[in-house]
Image (spheres, coloured by chain):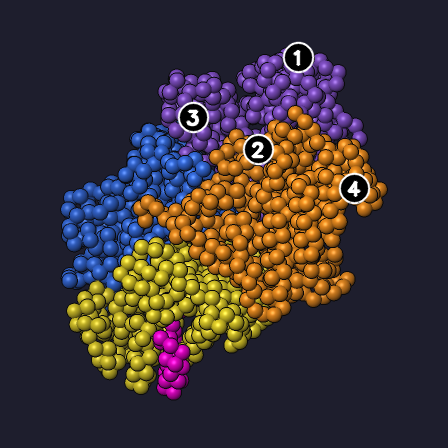
Chain colours: A blue, B purple, C orange, D yellow
Amino acid sequence: MTDIGIGMIGGGYMGKAHSVAMAAVGAVFDTRLRPRLEMIAATSAESAERYRKAFGYQRATADWREVIDDPRVGAIIIATPQKLHREIAEAAFAAGKPVMCEKPMGASLADAEAMVAAAEASGQVNMVAYNYIRTPASQYARQLLREGAIGEITWFRGENAEDFLSDPESPATWRTEGMANGTIGDLAPHMLNAALALMGPIKSLVAELETVHHERPGGKVTNDDQVQMMVRFANGAMGQLHSSRIATGRKMGYAYEIHGTKGAIRFDQEDQNSLWLYRATGPEAERGYTKILTGPAHPDYRPFCLGPGHGTGYQDQIIIEAKDFLEAIAEGTPRWPTFRDGLDVVRVIHAAIESARSRTWQDL
Amino acid sequence: MTDIGIGMIGGGYMGKAHSVAMAAVGAVFDTRLRPRLEMIAATSAESAERYRKAFGYQRATADWREVIDDPRVGAIIIATPQKLHREIAEAAFAAGKPVMCEKPMGASLADAEAMVAAAEASGQVNMVAYNYIRTPASQYARQLLREGAIGEITWFRGENAEDFLSDPESPATWRTEGMANGTIGDLAPHMLNAALALMGPIKSLVAELETVHHERPGGKVTNDDQVQMMVRFANGAMGQLHSSRIATGRKMGYAYEIHGTKGAIRFDQEDQNSLWLYRATGPEAERGYTKILTGPAHPDYRPFCLGPGHGTGYQDQIIIEAKDFLEAIAEGTPRWPTFRDGLDVVRVIHAAIESARSRTWQDL
Amino acid sequence: MTDIGIGMIGGGYMGKAHSVAMAAVGAVFDTRLRPRLEMIAATSAESAERYRKAFGYQRATADWREVIDDPRVGAIIIATPQKLHREIAEAAFAAGKPVMCEKPMGASLADAEAMVAAAEASGQVNMVAYNYIRTPASQYARQLLREGAIGEITWFRGENAEDFLSDPESPATWRTEGMANGTIGDLAPHMLNAALALMGPIKSLVAELETVHHERPGGKVTNDDQVQMMVRFANGAMGQLHSSRIATGRKMGYAYEIHGTKGAIRFDQEDQNSLWLYRATGPEAERGYTKILTGPAHPDYRPFCLGPGHGTGYQDQIIIEAKDFLEAIAEGTPRWPTFRDGLDVVRVIHAAIESARSRTWQDL
Amino acid sequence: MTDIGIGMIGGGYMGKAHSVAMAAVGAVFDTRLRPRLEMIAATSAESAERYRKAFGYQRATADWREVIDDPRVGAIIIATPQKLHREIAEAAFAAGKPVMCEKPMGASLADAEAMVAAAEASGQVNMVAYNYIRTPASQYARQLLREGAIGEITWFRGENAEDFLSDPESPATWRTEGMANGTIGDLAPHMLNAALALMGPIKSLVAELETVHHERPGGKVTNDDQVQMMVRFANGAMGQLHSSRIATGRKMGYAYEIHGTKGAIRFDQEDQNSLWLYRATGPEAERGYTKILTGPAHPDYRPFCLGPGHGTGYQDQIIIEAKDFLEAIAEGTPRWPTFRDGLDVVRVIHAAIESARSRTWQDL
């Protein structure tokens, strides 16, 4: 068993999630590479030290370059605001270190393209942290689709809807400024990643972006509250996508519904331990959607619990992701979704923005 | 108590449903006007006589004009294929008789416009038989929206998806021929009627129609299997619509989800006795969607049963519709949805077809 | 086609339900015998006349014996309070007329036994109106069990819980007086009928009856609010039963869950158009409860609607029951549940009362 | 920040779960005491070493006494078979160390009593590892009940049903031998703990134990497959309990339903991130069960995720438990459920066994 020093850049929401994951993943998965929480960087020495103590890192710094340059740090996790992703990733690859970067990649298409170029030039392991698609249920959905369990796909509906800004009186914050922090920039990528993972490439789309609440206490809103799209996938199927931060009542509406000629699949992250599968076989009187509770028979569930239906949670999907990143490093082979896969999401985002602007269908 | 002779034109699926409704409605609602099942017309004397016996009419005929001309017939129900709607309706209005016509109105926009003209010229009661919107749950949803229960509407998703043609080996029939019998012509109207009833007029849309299975045993398919739209309503909200006859696993997917600034509503006809309501009030820890079982507190439920949660079914929504038609006649006042309301649906259909053809947004 | 005059005794809740059913059943099922709403009796001439008009009977009377003696009345439906069941049934059988009697049979074990004797001595068709077990879903559950679909039965849980008296401030009424109107007397019989229908005879039981609210505005409560039992069925399986009129939040909690060695079944009348079936076959990863929406493939659904998932409701189960009663008369053969089957329910009730009194297990 | 050496005795299912929890808990909860995975004991040196490496302990041993005696071990977790609980706990308390012991306490009533005596004599922190009751949803249910949210409790139904032995061809193992490993001994305790936690003490009960499958491949079965009880709580409410390891289709059926005069609560661990709450307030038309998704507003959720509805899983409830154990040590105050609370569960088990044997109601 070899260990590897983890260098975490950013200590907020996702910085904590990745830190917990790195603390737990070895015991859960009996990984070959054992992560050591080596150093964490934050915007000030005080906050870095606070995160260090809270999460259990050896050292803290206010300078992310120190993390990258440190010889005891063997892998970098980027959990900063999007606008810093590119610069940090380029430095990490230049230092010859594998990188897992929070989604989406960079704050612009140019950023994302540069990050792919840097990753591929370096030959280092690179991965984008789309964690929702790693639940046992969604992994199993992907497996069923790969196996052709529901036949030819005829329809896809995807959604990533929450309600954290549904109250018009919620104040303006960093979240309400700049395209990268709006719905298309920050929330929709999870849904787009899911759509690409489950269905393959999008060929064309027509989209609308909308800012419903233009003013909030404390300031103007300069990005979108929700987005809707109609798409055509390269596999021939059509479908609809929706993402919203004002979807009153929706807490974690990461959901999809897929129709095929031989069956159908439904999933909603608000009940992440169930996958609904319909098979158009057997006597008509017995047909219906089967509510499958995830268990040891499904991908990456068994290490968490030997009993089916006992459930995994949000933090567990980050642990699965941590395992995949560690395995990728151990094997020296990138794991899906690589930076290039992440770039595909960014390209869809940019086509959607262009479609909304021009009110036309866009090809990809 | 006065009675009124019902003249039914058509004895198939909907002809039976309306006949049962007219047999039952008086006892259920203690209506002022009591329907008498007077005469039924079908395409042949044999089938008409068979329907007469089965449903309990006094007389049968193979000539629908006889029904209209008969002095004992006081109201006409049109349950024929769409292509006959116009001619029959015009004759009925010319004879000075109130008409309830199956949805959608006519086989073309011209038909629908002519039918509205005939209805309005005659001054007779006229109604289009959009029965799904008459369940207690959907009536209650309309009431909640009228009362502003969920605030300003920000999003609408509507669906009418079934799977009766999801098997590519299902043979070609009259259903697979002609725009009027395709998804946009025959199935989507229910969803569009619901969208208009719940949200008000549609201002613009972009749509796609798709024939997934171009050949079926027995012949070519000449109409669409599914349709998707993005719309903008006159009330400012945006939304998505989908209708399909190949939605594997969906049996009666007449469903909608509506977000507002103060709450949200969800409904699915597959569980037609529940309406899900979210109110963004009260302590955060207690918020969630409330599953309301319909009962005597909801519109038109009490006459069916004094106990809540005991449930109404498909046939009951037709009985409610029959009651509304009879009340309209008793009062001499048309009830929603009139032929003019039905024309609104047809106009959306035609805009959708044009949008799909031209691949552009269309204004209404 | 022959018609038969229906004589209805009682015009309240169930009198109306049976009247609507008799008005509709011919058109729904194209029955051989066509019911004619001939005469209705109620406690006063005024109420009888009001019911006559509302439900569409030819004649009304304040004397139920007139109904029985009338030569145009061919079949009797008893929808009176329980204490009158016996006398009316005996008179009807003496007059040589088939009888459908509301559940439960009579107000006492002696009543029920006398009613069985009268029915069997007369040779007339006799049936107890346990309508809930006639939904397409529950009929299908019975069929699955008969076919052994879930193997040897190992467990049964049955419930009939509502909340119409859950508020301690709900006033005392006839419902809160007398064992026959309490939970064990009035509500539990539906659940017991279901248990016997699905599982076969009960061999032994231990029970508790409880009056939770002894005083209500307007008077003392002299019967039970809820009952619980543990039972052993003759088929060897054990199980639990519960019935309550104070089950806050439960509107129509007629529900059962059945485990077998090869599968399981779940049903809840609050979603009466779904039956949940688990089969312990196929790959572990695909196992789960299948939510089957009722449709034309299930018993007695097709005459209501050709589309699956479109749903039947409370009134429809009464229509199915009406059809069965008419078919029984047409064939001259009693249909389940006969008075003798109804007596089995009464015997369980009496054993439960004795068990609750003595706090001991009772054999049946 | 102080650290504390964890001594784990047992490395199987629960040994792993507690080890992962101790690896993760510091980063999740920013605990004052930071656990150090110091030493793990198993039945052989080989397995101990394997566990050590897999979970990340410093040292391993085949002798559990070494763990207890080691000066670097500050707290003991007992995750062995039940028959060893007593001896280990007594030794740990004698060594002056706090103990968390897997449920249930000991293999007999005498064991449990001795363990309480030892714990209380030592003055050390002691806790029984009933982890299911620590989900955010179940903690919130307890809080609602404490606050009287649903009024006076009138009914309780509790269940702990799984299907890991539902197949009669599943072979005989240690699980099918000895009362301590049967349903009443091993599975029912979770349900009983929940019942006591939510409702308070049980005053009397009548129970049945049943071995359905007496023979399995490989040997005879000498313990029970399922148990059913009717109980009366000290708070006056009655209720039913059921536990089964042959509940085909049930994967993690840890479920309860509670009726009160002002509301009701429902929970099922198979959807552990939802709590259903009914409040008998507000307009009748809006009443229904509210499906509350757990989130930062609920106990112990926020440290896992700032977003509501994102979900916690099985492993997270063990992490919450680890936090509570560490906090108890830091404060020097036992936390619920202490060994004495665990003894209450054992007493109910023994009364149930006696009731089943004698077929009589038993008082506690």
Which x, y percent locates residue D220? 31, 64
Same-subunit check for callouts 3 and 1: yes
Q: Is residue B233 above or below residue D171?
A: above
Which chain's residue wears label 1? B
The residue under label 4 is which amino acid type?
Answer: Ala
Q: Is residue D109 magenta?
A: yes
User: Residue tagged by mark 4?
Assistant: C41
Question: In the figure, residue B89 lies in which quadrant?
Answer: top right
User: Of residues C286 and B231, which is closer to you in this image?
Assistant: C286
Q: In the rendering, which numbered label is found on residue B65?
A: 1
Look at discs 2 and 3 and give the one toward the viewer: 2
Question: Can I make out residue C355 in this image?
Answer: yes
Q: Which sits in the foreground, D117 or C196? A: C196
Label 2 sits on residue: C304
Whole-angstrom CA distance, mark 2 to mark 1, is 29 Å
Locate residue A237: give its quadrant.
Answer: top left
Q: Residue furthest right?
A: C45
Mark 4 vs 2, N-terminal side: 4
Distance from Cα at disc 3 to Cα at disc 1 = 35 Å
Residue count near mark 4 (Cα–Cα under 10 Å), binned few <14, some 14–19, many ≥20 = many
Q: Residue at 17% of width from left, 48% of height from top?
A: A333
What is the span of residues highlighted in magenta in the rendered image? D103-132
Q: Chain of mark 4?
A: C
